[in-house]
Structure formats: structure tokens, C-alpha cells
Image (tube, rainbow, N blue to C red):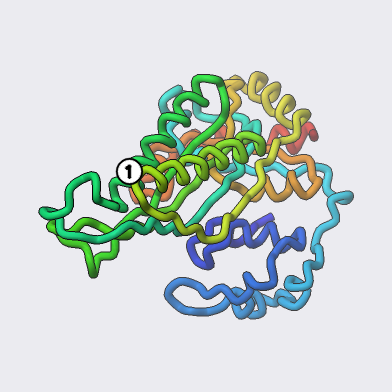
Amino acid sequence: MVLRGEESAFYGRANIGSRILFGQIDPRDLAAKRRGSGRTLREALTATGIDADAVAAGRRMIDPATVKAYLELHIEQGPVMVARKFPTAVVTGIRGNLRHRAIVCRGEAGHSGTVPRWLRRDAVFAVSDLLIRLDEHWMRLLERGLDLVVTTGVIGTDPDQQAISRIPGEVTFSFEVRSQSYETLEAFYELFRSECRAVSDMRHVKFEFDDRVYTEPARMDEAIVRKLVALSERLGLPSETLASGAGHDAAVFSNGGIPSGMIFVRNANGSHNPAEAMDLDDFMRGVELMHAFAVDGP
């Protein structure tokens, strides 16, 4: 099976192909325009022979009862397997996430030389304070053994207004938290909002939030995980298990009621990186494990 649009680069929506199979596309998503060409998702689907009206209506194109298992082979997209020196790993679960694409922190602009600290409403210092607080919470939760990653991948002031001698009055930033646990996601999100309120009160700024976007975590089927670990041992491969930090189509299949599993292959230099690399021998080890599973069955 070949699934289109796992990455969100073109339309800003991930797992388009698998979500269409399960009738999970929001009709509004069909109006999304491809970066560069401006072609809508509806137009792209129609051009490939897909009934866009059926997609908009949420019509399922797959019956979970007819599928015994779904198994996906993918690079890790992270540094763990390289660091631990194992070529393949069995995925135990896929982290869900909570996101805000663009939060605005509003303070007050001013002259950098004339406004003393106690009268400042500096948006950059406010957001910096917030992120340091979140990092401290993150570290303490990791020490308790919780699965959690926290990222602000986009942050900036208005380039038309920023200046070396100007106190920044506005900062826009993103927020993302990922975990295999729904409870951990929600608990950390509440910490995040609480710290926003605390920083707002202390630094006299205001936070404005766009829509919260949620992608639910997914557990890989325990029987499939056990089978893949046993097959790895039989083939002389490491019987390592690993959580996936990135989203995958396997999460859609798992949450759609189909027993699912994933095999990771080691790759150098991470992912979404021009230097990303994979050794073909590692890839073939992953293929060998996938073939063994197909022959033996779940």
C-alpha cells in the first residue's frame, strides 16, 4: 500500500492519504492550498480520480474487519538508534501532540534607553521567561519517568518593526508538546497555560491563542510488538523497542481499529534535514524483518 501526503509540507495537513481511507478528513481541509502552486486539495484529489465529495462526507474507504494487520517500515528520524548503535528497532507507540501554530504575546514597545526594567512590558523577555519555566517543568517530569518532548519551533518579532534600540512589544511563537500519554499531554498543557497566566501577571503582557490542534497518541498492537521482537532475535537483529516521536500513518490505522506495528531503521543526521542519510544495509535488515513478519503472520 502506498499512502500519499504523510508529511504536511504541501497542504499543512499530515497523514492525508490514511485519514481519507478512514473518513477522517475535515471538509474544510479540502480548501487548503498547496504551497507554491495554490492548487487546492480538492483539485488534487479530483485530478487523481478520487471522489472529493465522498471524502468531504467522511465516507470510509477501508473496512477494518477485512484487514488482519498493518505494518509500516520507516526511518527513525531521530538520533537514538545511531547513538545506541542498533540498525533496526520495534516501535511500541507513536506520540500524540498538542499544538498552537501562532501564539501572540503582546507587551508594549518603547525606547531601549529610556524605559527602566520595572516599567517595561517586554514581549521577548516574557516569552523567554515562559520557555525557561516550561523547560524546568519538562526536566522534572522526565526525572519522574514520563514520556514527553516540548518544542517551540517558530518564534520571532515583526521584522518591519524590530530594531536594536526598540523594546519589542509583540512576539509570535509556536508551542508543541508530544507524548505517548494523553494524560501527560493534557497535564503539561495545563502547566503551560498556568505559566502563561503567571508570566502575564508578572511582566504585564497578554497572551493571545490561536486554535489548539490535537493529534491523539497511538499504541502499537502488543501482540505485533512481541512478534517483531521475537523475529528480530531469530534473525540476529537487536530486540530493541522504541517510541516514535514523529507522527505516522500507523497511528491512523491503529486508532482506526486495525492491529498495527512499525519497524524503525537507523538513519544518520535526523530528518527534515538535507544531510539525512540511511545505510542501505540497514534498510535491507528492516525489509528482512518485515518479510519474516509477512511470512509468519501476526
Rendering coords of residue 4 (x, y %): 61, 61
Crowd class of label 1 (few under 14; some 14 to 19; many from 20; radius 10 Å):
few
- 133 vs 261, left or right, is left
Question: In the rendered image of this protein, does residue 277 appear above or below residue 101?
Answer: above
Count of picture labels: 1
Of the pair 71 and 34, the residue shown nearer to us: 34
Of the pair 265 and 219, the residue shown nearer to us: 219
Residue 287 in view of the camera? no
- 275 vs 189, left or right, is left
Q: Residue at x 54, y 43 (%)?
A: 246
- 136 vs 211, left or right, is left
Label 1 amino acid?
A: Ser
Question: In the rendered image of this protein, does residue 292 appear above or below residue 196?
Answer: above
Residue 123 in view of the camera? yes
Q: Residue at x 37, y 49 (%)?
A: 273
Q: Which residue is mark 1?
A: 128
Rendering coords of residue 232 (x, y %): 64, 24
Query: In which quarter of the view is residue 84 placed?
Result: top left
Please state, as top left, top right, bottom left or bottom right, where the C terminus lies in the image: top right
Q: In the displayed image of the protein, which residue is found farthest to the left?
A: 113
Query: In which quarter of the view is residue 212 placed?
Result: bottom right
Q: Residue at x 83, y 43 (%)?
A: 68
Rendering coords of residue 189 (x, y %): 56, 42
Callout 1: SS:
helix
Rendering coords of residue 35 (x, y %): 45, 71
Please state, as top left, top right, bottom left or bottom right, where the N terminus lies in the image: bottom right
Question: In the rendered image of this protein, does residue 177 appear above or below residue 101?
Answer: above
Q: Residue at x 79, y 45 (%)?
A: 258
Of the pair 195 and 293, the residue shown nearer to us: 195
Query: In which quarter of the view is residue 206 placed?
Result: bottom left
- 141 vs 249, left or right, is left
Q: In the displayed image of the protein, which residue is found farthest to the front?
A: 119
